[in-house]
Amino acid sequence: MNQPAKILIISSDDKLQPGIGKALSDILPQIKTTLTSREGLKRIREEKFDVILTDSRMEDLSYQTLIRKIISRSPEADILVGLPVEDLFQINEILENGADDVFEIPLEPEDLHLKVSRLLKEKSFLESCGLVGKSSQLKQIAEAALQVAPTNITVLITGESGTGKELIARAIHANSLRKDKPFVAANVGALAEGVVESELFGHEKGAFTGAVNRRQGLFETASGGTIFLDEIAEFKPATQVKLLRVLEERSFMRVGGSSDIKVDVRVIAATNQNLDQKTREWTFRSDLYFRLAVVKIDMPPLRERPKDIPILVHSFIDKLNEQSKRKITGVTDDAMELFAKYSWPGNVRELRNFLESMLALAPDRNIEAADVKKYLDTETESNRRLPMVTGKSVETAEHELLLQAILALRAEIFNLKEVILGRRELRPEGRVESAGQFWSGQIKEAEIADDFNVDDMEKDLIQKAIVFTKGNRKKAAQLLGIGERTLYRKLDKYKLR
């Protein structure tokens, strides 16, 4: 931390306040004091503090209420609660209420100095990495990133989608000796199967149809700096071999090329899949995995670090307010509690999306508990509607999902046909049989055989989606509600490539 730490002491004990100041004197903090909890909360609204030390014996508010209100107003501040020696059995309860640590009363100066110094050091690690939060997991990740940053070691970052893996990669680069050189991010999963090698390694003129000029790949673009390869598990075997060669020999050949190109680039990879399992399944090379995972950093999901949620909420609100004329004026205490209790399956990305929607739909007011409950109810209902397939192979599950879309489309066509013939009025709900009924045998195959052949209709739907999206397979897959890899398999199956 470049500036002196700002510390607030909330205590009515006239001996405790000067004792704390003396214990922390060599840290040279800016210390402010209040005699009541309410005074302290007022001061927290007016300015930000790095550390807040409070006395569990305050009379105007219980320590549980005080901690909750501090977190709601200044979640980034580290909270230490002073406990009389005879009450030390309450440590776990205080930590569960959101405090970061406790200190003994009567004061042990060396112990308090050690704890505050550690918290300030961890805070500086997080700031150096540009990480928002204060959970123990995030602090450990920041420390690991700073330790590995000055080296050229390859790093593998794992974790669920939306946890912020690229942010860690950028933090490593920003604190490395390569920080003044390029940082190039490549999302392998977003690249079409046929262009991955060309995008990464470049190509020579005439290497394939459409290659009218020589093209530099991302590895050459990142030369001297860092390349971040996201969704590394999507690499095909041939590309895995090329990447392994880059890691071992620091050279590669462009597509269609005949000479080696030397490159000095640091590789940081990321995945949301289990590469250990993929190596056992022989879909990912074990030698490449071991070369990538020289250092492995795992980003835990947001649900496992609830301490970070209030800080992220405040940080996102500040950024959104800077970018918009509309404002989110704050978050109520009850709403913040709901934020912390929700599992956030989409992780940090989902949290930000929710706040962006609140800025658009309900600006210039506080986010209240009712707003969060409405979102949670919507998400729960949405999850209930997702197809639940159990005990089936991947192919069967995919077939069922496509059949469900076909059945819905058939119902709409049947409904429209009835209207055109004048047999009845349009029924918005149509006549839809579920895929689950079909597969369970409640709807006999003979009942729909006269109307359509499933494979033919599936092929027809895919063809129409490809035509509608002008050959953009990613958009076609989104339109059909299936993954890109599923679409590629279907294209091969029906010879539509």
Image (spheres, helix red, strand yellow):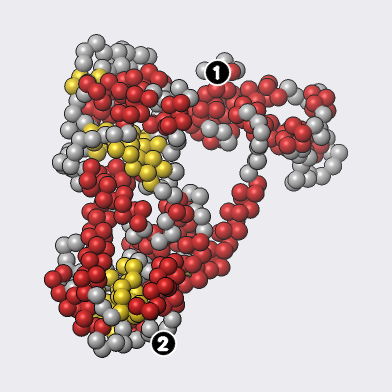
Residue 380 position in % (x across, y down):
61, 54
Q: In the drawing, does residue 181 fall left or right of residue 138?
A: left
Residue under the image location 22 percent in, 78 percent down: 20
Residue 279 position in % (x across, y down):
43, 26
Mark 1: which amino acid?
Asp
Q: Residues within 10 Å of mark 1 (few under 14, many from 20)?
A: few
Q: In the drawing, does residue 25 fall left or right of residue 232?
A: left
Residue at label 2?
60
Mark 2: which amino acid?
Asp
Q: Residues within 10 Å of mark 2 (few under 14, many from 20)?
A: few
Gap in angstroms between the C-alphas marked 2 and 1: 71 Å
Residue under the image location 44 percent in, 43 percent down: 160
| Residue closest to the far top | 258
Residue at label 1?
492
Near-viewer residue (382 or 157): 157
Dot 2 falls on a residue whose secondary structure is loop
Q: Quadrant of residue 61?
A: bottom left
Residue under the image location 38 percent in, 18 percent down: 238
Q: Which mark is residue 327?
A: none
Residue under the image location 27 percent in, 29 percent down: 218
Choose mark 2 or mark 1, whichever is in front: 2
